[in-house]
Image: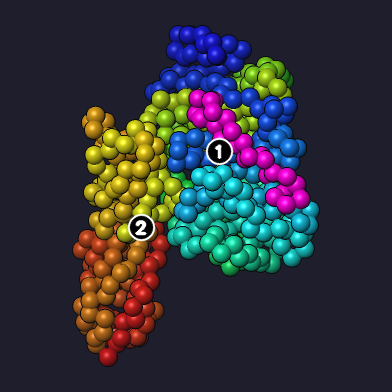
Amino acid sequence: MKYIQFATIAVAVGIFISIPAPLHAQFVLSDIYDFNCETGGCDPYDFGQLTLGTNGNLYGTTIGGGTGHGSIFMVAPDGTGYQEWDFDGPSLGDGPAAGLTLAEDGNFYGTTTSGGSFGYGTLFRFNPVTTTITVLHHFTGMADGGSPNVAPVEPKISDGYLYGFAAGQFVPYRVNMAKGTFKSYAGQNFTSTAPLVAASDGYFYGTNNNGGANADGAIFRMTLKGAITTRYSFTGGTDGEYPQGPLVLAGDGLLYGTTSAGGQNGNGALFNLAPSSKKVKPLYSFTALNGSGVNNDGATPLAGLVAAGDGNLYGTTSLGGTNAVGTAFRIATGGGSFASLASFTGNPGFFGTEATATLMENTDGSFYAVTKNMGENSAGYLYKLAYNFLNITWCCNRWLVLDQPVTVLGQNLEGAVSVTIGGAAAQFQPGSSTYLTAEVPSGAIDGPIMVTLATGLQVSSETAHIAPKIINLDPSSGPVGTQVAIVGGGFTGATKVTFGGVKATTFTVVTPALIQAIVPTGAKSGKVDVVTPDGTAASKQTFTVN
């Protein structure tokens, strides 16, 4: 692909973008791969986010192409090595209209919206080593809802299950990854196009694009047993209206999202929500459009945001910008500075509108996403927003737990000489140039994962959160007034300790792995709980009050 060098950026011929100054890094927007219905999968789902594999390749799904029933695809970040695995309709499903989830077991999971034994779609597992697709559930269109349009996700602390929902009446479900057993819960009367996200309080959160008390959309919360409650109803004012994209958990512990309408100018807004709150905080309203649909910052963000390794949030709009067909933008967490980074051109055969899929940050320092219908073949394309900020990330759960292995994804990791998690040295085992595994150390606190390479280069991730875990009580019995050593990890910032449900009035966080607490008056025999900003841990042991 030919590139032209401008004063501050290089761009591909035919895909010129405008990038306002000043910027702290060079942003380059380029077309990486064009889908083709004649020779492979095509039309990637409008809201389907890409997923990074442990081999360093990008994975996603297409609705059409292949055998005509859609496909799973893999492609290298430079657009080479494209491969696909096709669905067949009756047995595997038809139209995988969602992205994929890479789970702790190393497999990808996703859904199809139709096909299968009953015509209402399937829930499937894809093994990237054997490249086999295995159906775990055929949706019936009855109690299980049917026609799922998002991939299931793992909870805050992996429990061996994936959780998701089917379209229609929004029927929540869970599936056991090892056994493939499926359970659905009572349906809800609303729709959603965005996958769930697990927050620090242990609940799942999602967006409902047309419900809520005002029919302007809402944020909902879901328990592990499928119980749904509305946390916030949008008003269509400065808070926004009609959220379409998923929420994202940022390093500050807050949930961030977009609305496709509303805001001060009716063109959409950005917001955050604390899991403990029932009210969103408006962060930014996209500006008014002129008569040609043009503005400086974009309009109608249909995609969600991505929390990047540099501590900022990145996203796209589907309209507005200098060419009226959308932009890429950045905003600081907490509602800090906003910058429009690039404007799509709308040129046929290159970058057009329909930037509706949430960006994925790769460890090469770039963001990747797909669009439907556009590209040289009008069958969709995969694009890259280069940032040149090397980083690492981890799979698959966003919370880290003491003594559990973490798969760290990055570049040139075969040369790693040390790994720290939240400032504490971690034992690790190199896997390949694109991944390694590390154990969460007892001294870890909330902070980035950092890898030092043999070259001396240090690369880090976004903030990782350490979930509290209790592994021992010493002693495990005693009268009121006994000092008990609570041993484990993730205790930094602990706000509460209870014995059998009774709050301890005296406790000290000695280290991230040790709390000394006094058995309080009125304490009852039972579990010991520790509450931190990252959640609650319960002891497996029973403390006996005697």
Main SS of the magenta part reads loop
**Amino acid type of the residue that numbered disc 1 sits on in the rendered structure:** Tyr
Specify start and end residues of the magenta stretch as a single range.
71-96
First in sequence, mark 2 or 1: give its number.
1
If the image is split into quadrants, where does the N terminus sit?
top right
Image spot of residue 384 (x, y percent) = 53, 26
Question: Residue 187 lies in magenta, yes or no?
Answer: no
Position above or below: 41 against 226? above
Identity of the residue drawn at 50% across and 58% down: 155
Q: Does residue 372 appear in the picture of this structure?
A: no
The residue where tag 1 is placed is 59
Image spot of residue 420 (x, y percent) = 27, 46
Q: Is residue 20 left or right of residue 185?
A: left
Q: Which SS class for mark 2?
A: loop
Image spot of residue 351 (x, y percent) = 63, 21
Identity of the residue drawn at 62% across and 48% down: 133
